[in-house]
Structure formats: C-alpha cells, structure tokens
Image (spheres, grey):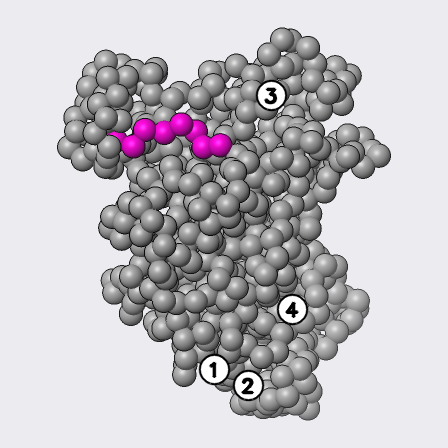
Amino acid sequence: MLSRTAENLFWMGRYIERAESTARLMEMGQRMAMLPGAGERDEWRSVVTSCGSAHHFDKAERISEVAAARALVLDGDNPSSIRACLSAARANGKAVRTALTREMWESLNDGWRKLESVDPGAQSLRRELPELLDWTKRRANLLRGAAETSMLRNDGWDFMRIGGFLERADMILRLLDVKYFVLLPETDVVGGGRDHHQWTSVLHATSATRAFHHVYRGDYAPWQITDFLLLNRAFPRSLSHCYRQTLGHLEHIERRYGARHPCHDTALAMVERLESAGMGELFKQGLHEFVSDALAVTARLSREIKEAYHF
Amino acid sequence: MFNEMSGSDGKLRDPYAGIAEWLESSGVDLLNRRSEEAEAIFRRIGITFAVYGEGGDPERLIPFDLIPRVFAAAEWRRLDRGIRQRARALNAFLYDVYHRGEILRAGIVPAHLVYRNSAFLPEMMGVKPPGRVYSHIVGIDIVRTGADDFQVLEDNCRTPSGVSYMLENREIMMRMFPELFDGGGVEPVDDYPDALRKTLEEVAPPACKGDPTCVVMTPGPLNSAYYEHSFLADLMGVELVEPQDLFVDDGLVWMRTTRGPQRVDVIYRRIDDDYIDPLSFRPDSLLGVPGLFDAYRAGGVTLCSAPGAGVADDKAIYTFVPDMIRFYLGEKPILDNVPTWRCAETDSCKYVLEHLDELVVKEVHGSGGYGMLIGPKATKEECEAYAKRILADPSDFIAQPTLDLSATPTISGGVVSPRHVDFRPYCLVGQEMRLVPGGLTRVALREGSLVVNSSQGGGVKDTWVLSE
C-alpha cells in the first residue's frame, strides 16, 4: 500500500485513541475534584500534565475544571484537545478515503464539527461536559466497531491498529508518569481513605475499576493496581496487552512483506520484558525509572515503524 | 419552454408516465420529508464539494432533487450515437493537430485558433499516445429545447467531473424509492467504474508488459472534487495517489509504498496540465511529479487525459466540431451545436454588439458559468460594460442565442414545479468506446434561472434511461 496511506491510517488510529484517552482523563479529574482536600492538591494539573498540555497553564495557577475542559476538550489550537484529535483523525481518514469502508468514514464524518459550537461559558460547559465526554468515547467505539466489522484485514488494518495501541500504551505510561508517587509501595503504609481514592482514580482514568475487581476481588493495593495496568495480559488497556497486540500486527506485516525491521525487535524485547518481569522486580528497579524507560522505548518504536515503512 | 413531462401542449409524455403516477400517489409532504432524509444521507456519506474562502461550512452539498429526469429508449439511442460520434471526432482532431494538422491545412479550422491557444502544448507535437486516444473521458454538455431538439452546448475533453453524482444519485434513489425500480424499467449505470477501469487498462503504455497498474491522481483532500477522486479510485479498486506519492526513475513512474517502490502504468490524473510536472510546465508548481512528462513522451506511462487535450474543448474550437465530424468521419453530425457567433469575425461581432440584449455571451476560455453575460437578464449598464470588454478583444468572446432550455418537474420551496435542466453524459474512449446509459442532469433551482452550475446555485437529479 502507499506509504502515505499507511501513515494516515496509523495517525487516524492514534488520534482517535488520544481523543478517547483525553475523555477518560477528564472523567478522572472530575472524580478527584469531588474528593475532600481536592482544592489543595490541584488535581486538574495531573490531568493536563498526563495529556501533555501543562505548558498551556501558568505554573502557579490553580487549574479549574472549566479551564481544563476548555483546553483539553474545546481548544482547536491545542493539538492534544479532543476537538483537535477528532478533526485530525478525520483529516487523516479523509486523505485515505479509499482505504476506509463507508461505515468507517461515516463514523468519522458524522457530527465532526459538534465541538466547534459548544458554548464555552463556565456554567453550561460544566453541565454539558459529562455528555460531551461520553459522546467522545462513543465516537471512538463507533469507528473501532465499524472497522472491526467492515475493514479488510490487510496491512491497512495492521497500521491503523498499531497506531491505536501505541497511543494507548503511551497514555497508560503518561498517566503513571504523573501519578506514580501515589502508587509507590511505601504509600501502602499511609493507608487511609484519601489514598484509597487516589489509587482508584487511576483505575477510573482507564475505565478499569470493575475489571480490576473481577481480577483481584478484595481490596485495593497500589502494587496490584500497577500490576494490573502494566502487566495484566487480559486487560485491554494494559501496557502488556498493547505491546502484545502491536507485536502481533507487526508480525502480520512481516509475514505479508517478508521483511523484518528493527521495530520488530524493539516490540518483541518489550513484550518479553513485560512477560518475564513480576511487579516486585519493577518496583525494585524503580517504578518511575521503568515508566520513563518504557516511554522512551515507545517513542523509539514509533520512529522505527516510520523508517521501516517509508512514512 | 419545452416541459419534458407535459410537453408543449400540456399532455403527459410517455416516458414520464411512471413519474407522474408516483408524484400523484406520494404527495408533496412525503417528498419534502424524503428530501431532507436524502440531504442527511449525502452529508453523512460526505458527498460534498469544497468551497474555501467564503466563510460558512467549507464542505458543501450540491442540492439533490428527488424527481428523476427521464429519457425514452429511442431518445437515448440517438443521443448515444451522437455522443460517440462527437467523442471520435474530438480525438481525431487532437491526433491531427499534434501531427500533420490536415484540418488546418484544408482551411477548415483557422490555424491560429489552435497554435495560439493557451491549451495547445507544442511539447505534444509528434507524441503518439496509446490507441491514439487523447481524451479518455469525454463529457459532453447537452441541452434540450424541444421534443426532438438536442444541442451540444460544450465539450469537456480534459477531466470532466460530476460522474460520482450520477452514481450516487442513483444509489440514493434506489435506497429511498425501491418501488420505482420494480420490474427493471430503468437502465443501470453502476458498471461505470468497471468500464472506466477497462478503458484505463486498454491504454497501457508500451513499457508495460504484464497487467497494468492504474491509479487516480488527485491534488489532495482540499480539492473541490476530492470526494469524486476517492470515490472512483475506491470503486475501481486502484490507489488514489497524490503527486508526492509518485516519482520518476529511469523513464518509468513509481509510487512509494510500504514495501518500497511499485511501478505505475496508467495515471487517471485529475490535475490540470500546468501542474502535472514542474520540470516541463510550471516550475513554481508545488503539485506535480518532476520528470512525469518526459516519462510519458517516452512511453513509460500513460496520462489520461493526454496533456494538451484541452485544445479541443475550447469554446472557439467548439464551433468547428460539426466540421470535424464531416472532415474526419465523413458523417453528418447527429447532434447539432447551439448556433454560435464568433466575435473574432467582424460581421458576427457587429451582430453580437447590436443584439447584446438577446444573447448569451461567453469568454472563450471561461468555465463554470463565470464571466458570462445573459443579455435578457442584464441591465443596460451591464450590457454597455460588457460591450467594452468585447471590443477590447473580440476574439476572446463567443455569443449564442438565449436558449429556452427544457424543464422537468422539481421540488422547490415545498412544491413541485418545472425547472430548467441540462445533461452531461460521460463517454469513455479506450480501444473500445463505452457509454453507460445515463449521465448527470443539472438543474437550475431558482425559478426561471438558466444557470445550472453547482458553483451558482444549481442542483442535480438522477437521470433515467428507460429500457426498451
């Protein structure tokens, strides 16, 4: 397929995933802002930081929900905002119309200008926000569902999915990069209600509370949460799952084209590392160090894919 | 005015019997509701054309009118022969002017109209395109003024657009009103993409040995017809490329793919001559594939349409097409031209200036309905201003009588009333000639208006050719 087509599909997958991740992070922010003591903690800063949009705010400023929503949902000039992501996903899709099925295109195209006309006034925005975030997640689900049921399983499918999984992996890592301090083993000692909510908020950001209970039943413990988000193979937003899927799609392409590239080795090395490591080891090595390292590997993998397929 | 449904005498014409019954039984309310549904579908599918720089929604819909325009089988038989005849003559003319120029030597077409024409490419002299085909998709704009009076208004030999509407209009009609198609009384048009692909494959270049790889080349998503480009590529199952996806190496054309370079044999390009190759044409062009034209001349790739094909569809050349038919084919033209005065000729110019208020005057190189004067609708001041423009450069203008275009029933402002229409069929020319029974009917939605161009408030309709 055309390299440009592969690139557009890759980015379409990424942008749709990013829009959804941002919606989930906004929901986490809303929950945390309702907890006692939220005022002192500046919870929204961790949200905008996870989204890579901290530089849009003054360092000393206390970020409000409305300010975060304007920047992360409505601001067309912020490339990380939901509006910008959805419109970039559509632009990428439009550039490769022939690689999309009609159902996929319709799910990208339907209502794509909705966020342009949302009233940014504080009161109405707070009222509308939950529905807007739901709507965003529905957009992503619709596109993925349309792709799942209508798209040829060719290399275009692989490139689109790789884009999505890399973005999802990136998002988990960025969230942990911002939040790791509440999940370190020593916070176990602190115990208590507030930390409990801090931990669960991370699960909320990944829509994982219920899934977590299915896997672990009992109480929350930070190491379990981290284990779940990084190493659990069954959880579709875990780093392990994202990398296994990425590797699987890269191997499809390898078989189809009959050529292996450095990106294959990078993805394989990460999968092996995640499968062999227990959480204890990751903590010994240092959670923050691991997360920083995995972020760097993910960025490198993205570059290697572009080089291998002439993007 | 000739009303295609009720004739000149108010009696229902046969081809419209089914439509009349349908209109009667549906009622206006239902039709209005269905019109809104159709618009919603078009927008969701994204069948839009782009208009930039005017504010508002940059991606607009062409208004779609639900009531089909109908041709009887016998009417179509005549149109079909006339269209094919014209497409043959136009291609013969193009071959001639880029080779010996017999028609010019014979004094039938003035040489300066060809050689000084901005669409004439001296670089094409002596180049032999595969099958001697220059214009592979000939769009011929036809108007009707009476029961038996069809006239050609304009030829389009470069890359006529609009065929996606022919296909989508039919799809939407079949989806919304399946009962209308019961019994198979309407000729299908959906084999057009197949016919186009075969046409492209038939003109593969000498350098192509195996199965030809065809592509559609678009300037990109910002182009106003981008939807159509992607639509056609999709239906043909070929790649939609932008110029930056292609490069020329060793006289052959390649596209950049995820597996490395892949050969391209035939390019259906939807980019103007000026922009296909910055080395041969406009050096300032950001579009284009450097070296493409040389690869074409050397037989490494086929461009559809051939560069320089536009010299045959210029409005000044248009007036000579009936002569071309007689000269190259030895046949009598089946479809007439609209009578046309060439202002380049002194007597004609004098007549035009004296009768400005009755005539439609057009710029020779204009298109899209821009820059024309519709005499009967113009004020005295507008006529005087236009007369000055004609005098400044008479050879830049032609004039035609104000045609009383036929009208067909159309939903407008919630009621059904007659609106003027024209018609553009698409004739495909490869080793064979192919013409699907149908085309694009454009309709002037404003009452009394004769301007059907989509850039000026025109809409489109499904066009039916009834089966025998």
Res. A307 mark: 1
Q: Chain of mark 1?
A: A
Query: What is the crowding at mark 4: few (fewer than 14 residues within 10 Å), some, or many (at least 20)?
Result: many
The residue under the point 69% across, 56% down is A146
- Residue marked by disc 3: B147
**Splitting the image into 4 quarters, where does residue B175 fall?**
top right
Is A29 above or below relative to B326?
below
Residue A238 appears left or right of A178: right
Q: Mark 4 vs mark 2: which is more N-terminal?
A: 4
Q: Nearer the viewer, mark 4 or mark 3?
A: 3
- Does residue B303 sit above or below A289 in this rendering? above
- The kind of residue on which mark 1 rests is Glu
**Do the residues under discs 4 and 3 have CB atoms within 8 angstroms?**
no
Residue that numbered label 2 is attached to: A263
- Residue at point 42%, 34% (across, down): B455
Magenta residues span B336-343
Amino acid marked by disc 4: Trp
Q: Indicate whether B197 appears above or below A127.
A: below
Query: Sequence order check: which comes first, mark 4 or mark 1?
Result: 4
Numbered disc 1: secondary structure: helix
A305 or B183, which lies in front?
B183
Tell me whether circle 1 and circle 2 mark residues in contact (CB < 8 Å): yes
Residue B297 seen:
yes
Chain letter belonging to callout 2: A
Magenta span contains residue A5: no
Identify the residue at the far top of this view.
Answer: B9
The spot of residue B187 in percent (x, y) is 73, 39
Amino acid type, label 3: Ala
* Mark 3 crowdedness (10 Å alpha carbons): few <14, some 14-19, many ≥20: some
Residue topped by disc 4: A157
